[in-house]
Image (cartoon, rainbow, N blue to C red):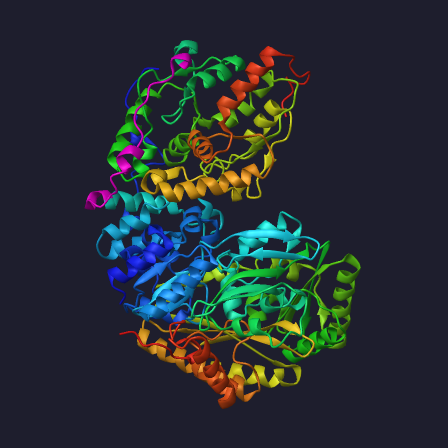
Amino acid sequence: MPSDDRLSELRALLGPGGVATDEAELAARTRDCWPLLTMRERAGEALPRPDAVVWPRSTDDVAAVYRWAVTQRVPVVPYGGGGGVCGGAAPVPGGIVLDTKRMAAIGPLDEVSGLVAVEPGVIGQTLEEWLGARGFTLGHFPSSITVSSVGGFAAARSAGQASTRYGTFPQMVAGYTAVLPDGTVVRRRAVPASAAGPDLGGLLLGAEGTLGCLTGFDLRVHRRPEAMGFRGWRLPAFTAGLEALRAVLQRGLRPAVVRLYDEADTGLSHPEFGGGCLLVCVAEGWPPLVDLEVAALGEAVAAAGGEDRGEEPARHWHAHRYDVSYRLAEFIKPGGAFGDAVAVDTMEVAACWARLPALYEGVRAALAGVMDLVLCHASHAYPDGACLYFTFGAAGAGDEPGVQARYAAAWDAGQHAALDAGATITHHHGVGLLRAAWLAEELGEGGMTMLRRIKAALDPAGVANPGKLGLGGQVPS
Amino acid sequence: VTGGGLRGPADLPGLAGLPGLADVRADAEHCSYCPKLCRFACPVAVATGRESVTPWGIDRAIVAATDGTVTAATAASVYACTGCRGCGSACLPGLDLPTHVRAARAAVVEAGHAPAAIEDAAGAPAAPDDALVANATAGAPTVVLAGCQSADGGDLARVLAATGVAYDVVRVPVCCGARAVDVGLADDGLGRLEVLQALLVAAETVVVADPHCARWLQVDGGDARVVTLPAWLAAHVDRLAFPAEAEPVAWHDPCWLGRGLGVYDEPRAVVAAAAGATPSEAIWHHDHARCTGAGMGYEAVDPDGAAVIAATRAAELAATGASVTVTACPSAAARLRAAGLEALDLPVYLSRRLAHAADGPARADASEPT
């Protein structure tokens, strides 16, 4: 634990308001939004706290914090909005939390190139509204947009609901500034593409603070769409819907939002369908292209045996696209909608089209063997594949240890089923603490060796978010 | 106005007693299981970056205090709220954080952990401005309350006189008690309300200039006679003669007027009539308008955080390019001025425009309401 003397050095670096050790703030820093940590707190467990929270205001401040941490051998856990769902921002006992939210500048906006400079602590919704007032959009709409930060998007390689048109967050990063764990500052100018050596930024995106902290971004932005098109269809089966999506994506079209819900999910949201699967599309951009994308998907759906349900399903989805996040508390709070000790989580995996049907069946069966409810939708579609997003839950009937055991078993079974089907274990939520074990299986011995060597080279003191991604690091005294 | 019998809080339909910690626990617990989806809308969370002051952090502290002990840490969280209801505008379940905060602060006061600064933030009974009294008509059915935070009673008197409507005022020092309740001094606040209500018993309409007082009297107190000054003026603006020369102004929605009472269109209409132009809007406006840091005593408890909030809002309003920002809350106007913005409370702005008109030609359409 950093002594008061050592923390006074931090206060000298960051100013008196730049370091907090008060009870109120440390008590609010026990977890991010990983459901297991929420469940453990709900069960009465006192989770570990950090020893201090620090708020740098600049890249130089961040570099100074890391240099101090190396000298003092204190773990540093970057923290943005705390919206991560894998424990990536969970505190390390004896360590400090490096909160980026006072680095929250937006601009300038380069309207010619379509680039905006953003600091890591900016919340996604704030950025989107700032851009919207100027006629632009980032096109990044994760369901956590009102809580999550730009730095968090980068840390977890986030994806938003309109990723089929605008890409995932790494594709939005044209330039960046980063601080490595020894305090070295890396600045990469914004360029559209480059062959100047390996993609160092790609290494930092998704590192979840284990290789330092990203402190600035040049993000690719777009003119706000001139038009939007909405359409919904009923498909006879999930695999038929996948075929329709594949046909459109492989024709080169990129409708912003395509979401195919399996029968279980469709049955909950649209019981009037009487079975089958809902597919919604929100296309946006140049009006002729919008019309073309909707028409092309309609044609593909018809070929797959689907039927047109008009605009309403897609408009309804769009109007309520963030509601599920707001409803989470209804399920997980004590005495919630399904009683005490409920477990709810999501598992987003991705694979190539040829493997998607097997992935769907495999993961669904694995989760259903342990949990009471399993829903799935396909989203984030690409020419070569798509993400399958499973939602699963269990009613623990007041048995907290029991439901935690079921939760762990569900994750183990689901992730192994994904690996067996040739999928990635995570499409856009990241690894954190939750998926460390399966990361090693996905990357293999060679991949993990490479990752560990990179970690050792960049963070020899082991202060950068130890434990996350299964990378270990310094064990606090 | 003289009382004709006591009308205390217990007689008011909306205020059978203030909720306590146990009353708000269920909603606070619900909030504490949310992934902090309103954090972007909380000015204190944005300004400080502290998790303990997000609405989630505040409600989490309230649950802990309800189930355990009220501590100094409880105070650190629950006094970090401006009551702006930005969180409420982003809350699908519609939780009302200021109600939770009031309950918690009363418990913190009782436990002896309240910040010393709250004494200065509790407001104090204030007598009406001499000009307001001089122009008042004893026994008039319309009674005007300027509020204890306004130092511009002379301007309000000028505007009221220009409408030609007879009004009366409470001629002794009074305070509605909202600010006292806000900071946790519940008994003081309720006592002040009781005194005021007794003095207002004969009024048919109560025009309240400070939206904070107005919400307390109207919503918490359940007093249907209460109308905000902007809403009342919107019905009388056609009687006012403004100068022909248009002036570019920006409008700032006060939190307690907008999100608190849902009054958005009326002040814009009044300002548009006075300015001769539609007021400009900051990026974040209407129910998404950002706070100035003025509410619920926050500026007294954390002046540094409040200064950041005010500076942020002032910069947003300055970006409109308007030479002056008008609002309808004396506290918000003061916060914005402290941040370097030319900001005026509505009566002050209207008074200035009326004076300007008196010195020169009035607009031909001045009698047309907008």
Q: In the figure, residue B102 lies in which quadrant?
A: top left
Residue drawn at (50%, 40%) of the image: B313
Q: Is residue A220 magenta?
A: no
Whole-percent x, y for residue A93 in the image: 30, 70
Q: Quadrant of the C terminus of chain A?
A: bottom left
Residue B73 as seen in the image, left or right of residue A258: left
Residue B147 as seen in the image, left or right of residue B290: left
Q: In the figure, residue B153 lies in which quadrant?
A: top left
Whole-percent x, y for residue A428 in the image: 54, 71
Question: Considering depth in this image, is A475 or A72 the residue closer to the camera?
Answer: A72
Residue B56 as seen in the image, left or right of residue B349: left
Question: Considering depth in this image, is A182 or A426 the residue closer to the camera?
Answer: A182
Residue A338 visible at all: no
Whole-percent x, y for residue A273 in the image: 63, 68
Whole-percent x, y for residue A259 in the image: 63, 69
Q: Is residue B128 magenta?
A: yes
Q: Quadrant of the N terminus of chain A?
A: bottom left
Up-down: is B209 above or below A60? above
Residue drawn at (50%, 17%) of the image: B159
Give the number of callouts. 0
Up-down: is B241 above or below A200? above
Residue B190 visible at all: yes
Q: Which residues are magenta?
A: B109-132
Q: In the figure, residue A68 lies in which quadrant?
A: bottom left
Question: Considering depth in this image, is A128 or B11 the residue closer to the camera?
Answer: A128
